[in-house]
Amino acid sequence: MKDTEVRKLTQKERARQKRVVNLIASENYTSRDVREALASEFTNKYAEGYPGARYYGGNEVVDELERLTQARALKLFKLSPDEWHVNVQPLSGSPANLAVYYALMAPFGKIMGLELSHGGHLTHGHKVSATGRLWTPVPYTLDPKSELLNYSAIKKIARKEKPDILVAGYTAYPRIIDWKKMRGAANAGGALLMADISHIAGLIAGSVYPSPFPYVSVVTTTMHKTLRGPRAALIFTRKDGTDFYKRIDKAIFPGLQGGPHMNTIAGVAVALREANTPNFKKYSRQVVKNARTLANELKKHDLRLVSGGTDTHLILVDTWRGGEGIGGKEASERLEREGIVVNKNTIPFDARSPQDPSGIRIGTAAETTRGKKEEDMVALAQRIAHILS
């Protein structure tokens, strides 16, 4: 690279990534092949439109690439192209969710999603997001005692509020979601059930987490978390005699985006192929083993975990403990000074500010990619407990 300033920054970031323990739950490490695709000649091509219906010439190879990526996405999750459609053009998870709402709801329609401080996402109808301003948010919360989803309470809210879309799938919920019960809640309110599996998509692909596809109408996911792909997103839509998938395609383009980033779609294709291998299933199993080991060891060191543990890659730690501990901001800063990177995070019914909440969020996907095993998690838990004490 001739640009010495950017080259130096790239080298600095590479060195930073190598020296830290990365426990950011929404981060991972892509393969060299994915990075090569991102830097490929597909960067140079403008491909507004869809395969066979572009607005520019010279897209015959691009059409092949996009169709290949769609086929690989359906194959990974064992979906029939007769029953499901997938859009591979969303630039990231937030635009993907926005496109679903834009396509399938009228303005001020109701989005029913988990409250942000309980583990939901900004784009599930939070008031600071466009999704909470253009549509009407109907929040639900976790059970105050178990800190788990209360399906009967969710069903009761849905029956009363009659939302247009009920969103399941979260950004800081460490437990298994009962998709069948969420389907029942959606049916009770006459809602479309949408799954946002951005955090757990790789675990679903790796067969260590139950699939939502038998129960939902729409599934959105990012690629860069447990799927180990580039920063991009996918939208899967059930066909079942509706025009929903056509409406979502139109919402992505021309509704919300222009030309897709074909180099990123190339990286998505590579990551999808990598995820459809025995090695990836082995990786996914290890991610969960590592998370459970780390969670159990942290509890041995008297750290309180939200919901008591984890079934996934994600652990939510209550560092504040009702005033007996430290805030999430201080906890994350202490850890980072010692080379362990996490993020501060709210916990259910958090009375503290999101800028300095009561907890931290920990994930094992990135360090598992680096080859960490259970014995490493035992040592890591001891370090974390020592630093936080």
Image (spheres, rainbow, N blue to C red):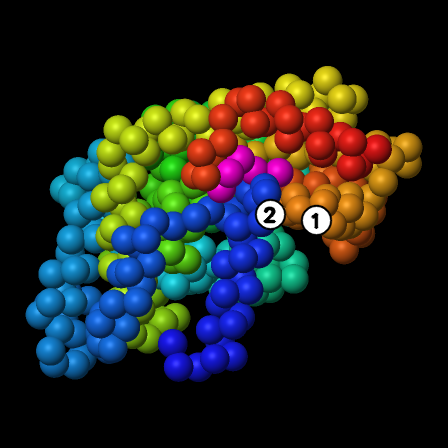
Mark 2 lies on residue:
20
The answer to whether one can see residue 84 in this image is no
Mark 1 lies on residue:
336
Highlighted range, magenta: 362-367
Between the residue at mark 1 and the residue at mark 2, the CA separation in whole angstroms equals: 8 Å
Q: Identify which amino acid the numbered label 2 is placed on.
A: Val
Question: What secondary structure is found at the residue carrying circle 1?
Answer: helix
Residue 154: which disc? Answer: none
Q: Residue at x 16, y 60 (%)?
A: 65
Question: Between residues 70 and 103, which one lies in front from this camera angle?
Answer: 70
Q: Is 381 drawn above or below residue 121 in the view shown?
A: above
Q: Are marks 1 and 2 in contact (CB under 8 Å)?
A: yes
The answer to whether one can see residue 17 in this image is yes
Q: Residue at x 27, y 45 (%)?
A: 272
Quarter of the image with the N terminus in it: bottom left
Q: Relative to 230, is 389 on the left or the right? A: right
Q: Is 142 drawn above or below residue 137 in the view shown?
A: above
Q: Position of residue 227 (x, y in %)?
A: 38, 43
Question: Between residues 141 and 342, which one lies in front from this camera angle?
Answer: 342
**Count of marks placed on residues:** 2
Residue 147 picture quarter:
top right
- Residue 2: say if magenta: no
Quarter of the image with the C terminus in it: top right
Q: Relative to 302, is 75 on the left or the right? A: left
Question: What secondary structure is found at the residue carrying circle 2?
Answer: loop
Q: Is 244 drawn above or below residue 46 in the view shown?
A: above
Q: Residue at x 56, y 38 (%)?
A: 363
Residue farthest right in this picture: 324
Question: Between residues 267 and 8, which one lies in front from this camera angle?
Answer: 8
Q: Position of residue 247 (x, y in %)?
A: 29, 60
Q: Relative to 233, is 24 on the left or the right? A: right
Residue 213 picture quarter:
top left
